């Protein structure tokens, strides 16, 4: 049975509604007027302040994981203020709200709920649907309360008056425009109407609608989080689980491993020597080999997870055989990751560092961590794959967002320039404000680099002319603009 949501207008509900209205106003100001900067961090701070006030006497569950997710949310929102990376700017607009919903449902769910099971996704969607129902019911309850004590005849009269005003508005709009065009004195009379009669504009109406929608979303969601619904999270013990026959999968693993072992043994020198093949240029050799090996590694990880999750191992011999074959598969994957890592390093040495290349480097290190845990899981079956994958992925994503990969790219390219004299100033200019700071540093070292002076002059004009509102305040932008204004360049 679904949990029944009651909509009662108590003092706490009215206070929460008022706070959610303020949150709605802040959210509309923070996200709908300019580029997002410090406004995201301020909104998250205000949102959680309201939430913890509402649940100040509530006993939270899953607190250790909850604290980890909360720290990640704070760090990701702070990155809008600290860094200026275009990719994470777009991703975090979706990632942060998703983490907030997951976090609030997690810490307000029953203690026996298993967040790493598919049923927890059902619980999240149930909370969202219930919050919508609660909001609709609450609005209806306010409407009923407003009608109480009002004479039906007077209410009907007011309805007719409002309808008459609505009908007259388009007629008045046309008539007034015609009369203003026909008589200059009448135009002056109309023009002398106080400005406060003109406050109702289309933009303000849209802003009010957005504020009311956001207020309803915040209020409804916070009100239903405390409702218990244990049937949603109860696991079916007699559920028929999908399985794959062990003999079939062992056959597949044997064939795959034979191919991988032959490939590794025959071409081991090709993997790691860096020797060019006659049919490939330096770039083709590094890029083609890298993408192929990385894709095969991801396939191997998928196969390993499928076997650990769905393969039925009836006997001890089948279990040990599967473990051995999976171990070989993981070890071969380590070799392929190492080869791919070296190939990408070769390509970077030849053509420079980019955000994508450094990001892929970090992703391969992340895969090494994942494969290492998976190797342990092969022999210790009680470990949970999803639990580790989720936490590791969350920490990895937060880390690469916070550390500012653009800074690594700039530093590596400046170091490469010192060694080889090669650098792509146009790429650094398009990277982010971190790239602009790198160009300033480069200009102070060498003012004769082609196109560098023109780029910095254009950037300085932009810094002098640009005026950002408070919502868009970004530390990296302010630092770059400050350095550009001080730069002596003509």
Image: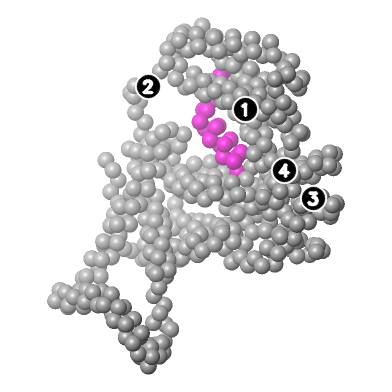
Residue at 63 percent across and 17 percent down: it is 332
Q: Is residue 409 visible?
A: yes
Q: Name the residue under label 1.
A: 291
Relative to 477, is 95 on the left or the right?
A: left
Q: Name the residue under label 3.
A: 450
Q: Which image quarter holds the N terminus?
A: top left
The answer to whether mark 2 and mark 3 are in CB contact below 8 A is: no
Q: Which of marks 1 and 2 is in front?
A: 1
Residue at 31 percent across and 63 percent down: it is 9
Q: Which of marks 2 and 4 is in front?
A: 4
Q: Mark 4 points at which residue?
A: 409
Q: Residue 241 carries which label?
A: 2
Expressed as whole percent of the image width and height from the top left, the position of residue 86 reads: 60, 49
Helix, strand or loop: magenta stretch: helix
Mark before the other along the chain sequence, 4 or 1: 1
- Element type at marker 2? loop
């Amino acid at each position: 049975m679904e949990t029944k949501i009651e909509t009662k207008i108590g003092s706490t509900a009215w206070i929460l509604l008022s706070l959610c209205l303020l949150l709605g106003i802040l959210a509309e100001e923070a996200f709908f007027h300019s580029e997002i900067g410090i406004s995201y961090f301020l909104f998250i701070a205000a949102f959680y302040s309201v939430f913890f006030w509402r649940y100040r006497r509530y006993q939270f569950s899953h607190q250790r994981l909850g604290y980890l997710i909360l720290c990640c949310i704070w760090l990701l929102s702070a990155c809008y203020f600290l860094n200026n990376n275009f990719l994470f700017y777009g991703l975090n607009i979706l990632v942060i709200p998703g983490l907030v919903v997951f976090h609030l449902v997690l810490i307000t769910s029953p203690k026996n709920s298993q967040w790493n099971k598919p049923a927890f996704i059902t619980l999240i969607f149930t909370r969202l649907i219930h919050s919508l129902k609660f909001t609709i019911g609450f609005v209806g309850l306010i409407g009923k309360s407003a009608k109480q004590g009002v004479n039906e005849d007077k209410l009907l009269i007011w309805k007719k008056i409002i309808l008459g005003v609505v009908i007259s508005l388009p007629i008045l709009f046309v008539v007034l425009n015609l009369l203003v065009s026909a008589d200059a004195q009448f135009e002056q009379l109309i023009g002398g109407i106080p400005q406060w009669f003109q406050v109702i504009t289309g933009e303000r109406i849209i802003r009010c609608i957005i504020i009311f929608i956001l207020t309803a979303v915040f209020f409804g969601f916070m009100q239903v989080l405390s409702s218990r619904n244990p049937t949603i999270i109860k696991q079916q013990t007699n559920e028929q689980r999908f399985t794959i026959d062990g003999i079939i999968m062992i056959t597949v693993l044997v064939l795959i491993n034979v191919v991988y072992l032959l490939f590794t043994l025959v071409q081991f020198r090709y993997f790691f020597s860096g020797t060019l093949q006659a049919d490939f240029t330096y770039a083709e050799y590094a890029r083609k080999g890298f993408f192929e090996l990385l894709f095969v590694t991801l396939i191997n990880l998928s196969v390993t997870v499928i076997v650990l999750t769905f393969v039925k191992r009836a006997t001890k011999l089948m279990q040990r055989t599967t473990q051995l074959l999976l171990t070989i598969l993981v070890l071969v994957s380590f070799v392929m990751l190492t080869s791919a890592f070296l190939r990408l390093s070769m390509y970077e040495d030849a053509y420079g560092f980019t955000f994508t290349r450094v990001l892929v480097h970090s992703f391969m290190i992340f895969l090494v961590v994942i494969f290492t845990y998976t190797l342990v899981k092969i022999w210790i079956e009680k470990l949970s794959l999803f639990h580790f994958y989720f936490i590791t992925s969350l920490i990895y994503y937060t880390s690469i967002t916070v550390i500012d990969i653009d800074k690594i790219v700039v530093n590596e390219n400046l170091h490469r320039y010192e060694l080889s004299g090669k650098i792509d100033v146009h790429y650094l200019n398009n990277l982010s404000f971190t790239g602009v700071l790198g160009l300033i540093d480069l200009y102070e070292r060498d003012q004769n680099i082609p196109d560098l002076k023109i780029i910095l002059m254009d950037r300085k004009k932009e810094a002098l002319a640009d005026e950002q509102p408070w919502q868009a305040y970004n530390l990296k932008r302010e630092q770059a603009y400050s350095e550009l204004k001080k730069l002596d360049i003509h």
